[in-house]
Image (spheres, grey):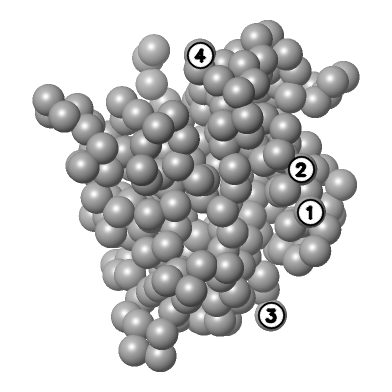
Amino acid sequence: MTTVLLTGFEPFDGQPVNASWAAVREVAAAWPGPVDAQDPAATATPDATPAPTPDAGRDATPDAATLIVRRLPVSFARAPQRLAELLAEHHPDLVICVGEAGGRGRVSVERVAINVQDARIPDEDGEQPVDVPVVAGGPAAHFSSLPVKAALLAAREAGVPAEVSNTAGTFVCNAIAYALADQLTRMPGARGGFVHVPRLPEQVAGGAPALDAARSARGITAVLAAALRHREDLVFAAGTES
């Protein structure tokens, strides 16, 4: 059986909630296959109805995949270490890490992660690295091994605003995206990448971009289905001018 590892983040910077974890819990609660979740509230029930993904996932088989759900700390040191432990423990076939992106209004499928940590604010351990590599001696960047265009199309067909993003920032989200891609180079056959979701409506004010957890979860589910369905990516224009 295919094993999928899906991660979100703990709250940070004084927030009571992290939109990534809220969305990941929704995905897990509606997952049609087996779920291994540390949080009982994120475990699917026998009555759970899968989040709808019209057309996008019609040939995918999430019901035949075991979903492992875990939460990562917002820590430059501890998050990559915890991710490495999870990869070693579960040997997943597919990994999607999800983070929260303030200021964005779309589910963002990240195309690339860069080998730099440049923190605007301290992480939850009080660390604030500036111009420090994620992996010393590593390449300048790693591209996602997700089918990013297929994932984009799937999310849009599921009715979720989505985009391909060419920057995951320089905070812990980018560090995890880079660390994941780096570790996957030593896991033949495994694939993975990073997805950003907008903040929740209750986290923002003044008309700032936001998306509710249910719609973000629908987008993540569509991305998962597309990744299970497509080994090779689709080819169509989804770039930006800036």
Look at the picture and state if 213 lies above or below 229.
above
Q: Which residue is labeled 4 in the image?
A: 120
Along the viewing direction, whichever of 124 and 219 lies nearer the viewer: 124
Q: Which residue is drawn at 80% across and 26% down?
A: 135
x and y percent of residue 217 in the render? 36, 58
Element carrying mark 2: helix
Quarter of the image containing the C terminus?
A: top left
Mark 2 or mark 3: whose residue is earlier in sequence: 3
Element carrying mark 4: loop
CA gap between label 1 and label 3 equals 21 Å
Badge 2 crowding class, 10 Å Cα cut-off, few under 14, some 14 to 19, many 20 or more, is: some
Q: Which residue is labeled 3 in the image?
A: 1
Q: Which residue is labeled 2 in the image?
A: 81
User: Is the C-beta separation of discs 2 and 1 under 8 Å?
Assistant: yes
Mark 1 or mark 3: whose residue is earlier in sequence: 3
Q: Which residue is drawn at 40% across and 44% down?
A: 18
Badge 4 crowding class, 10 Å Cα cut-off, few under 14, some 14 to 19, many 20 or more, is: few
x and y percent of residue 115 in the render? 71, 21
Along the viewing direction, whichever of 235 and 119 lies nearer the viewer: 119
CA gap between label 2 and label 4 equals 22 Å
Q: Which mark is residue 85?
A: 1
